[in-house]
Image: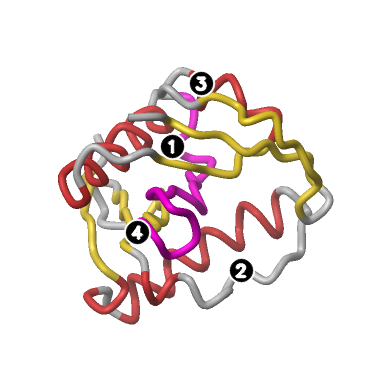
Amino acid sequence: MLNWTFKHYKELTLDEFHDCIALRIKVFVIEQDCPYQDLDGLDKECYHVLSTNVQGEIVGTARIIPPGLLYPSAGIGRIVLDPSVRGGKNGHELMKQSMQFIFTKFGETDMKLSAQKHLEQFYAQHGFSSTGKEYLEDGIPHVEMINKH
């Protein structure tokens, strides 16, 4: 069972931010062999989902982008789970938790995300639809998706 916490960047401890970035690098840069500029300046303006295991280790995270910062609507990005907690519906729970936080914090707003193309059906299960815009991002096929409200 995972625990879920939501914090604005300014509320994160140094260890929490370090562990979020370490997880993102572990998965996106090392596992997916995709070197990219992870620290893009947006983290400082965003909320962060922290998913911890029973030992208190961060094993999942997502970045909640407030409306108007990157998109007119809210956004979800940097969605990642440690390999140790994949396959048990934790990815779906991460999305549900992220979306519920957005509705609680910002109201019934549209949500946007940039999905790796192979995960398009996963996000469709959470009400996201392709806008038709497909592109390469850091060498990986992506699709722009939106959840209308």
Q: Which residue is mark 4?
A: 66
Q: Position of residue 110 (x, y in %)?
A: 37, 38
Inter-mark Cα distance, 1 to 2: 22 Å
Disc 4 on helix, strand or loop? loop
Which circle, 1 or 2, is nearer the viewer?
2
Q: Is residue 64 magenta?
A: no
Q: Nearer the viewer, mark 4 or mark 1?
A: 4
Stretch of the chain drawn in magenta: 67-87
Q: Is residue 62 above or below residue 147?
A: below
Who comes first in sequence, dot 2 or dot 3? 2
Amino acid identity at mark 3: Ala
* Amino acid tagged 4: Pro
**In the displayed structure, does residue 141 sit left or right of residue 144?**
right
Measured Cα–Cα span from mark 2 to mark 4: 18 Å
What is the distance, in whole Å, between disc 4 and disc 1 at their CAs? 27 Å
Numbered disc in front, either 3 or 1: 3
N-terminal of the pair, mark 2 or mark 4, is 2
Q: Which residue is mark 3?
A: 124
Q: Nearer the viewer, residue 54 or 107?
A: 107
The residue sitting at 48% across, 55% down in the picture is: 71
Please report contact status of discs 3 and 1: CB closer than 8 Å, yes or no. no
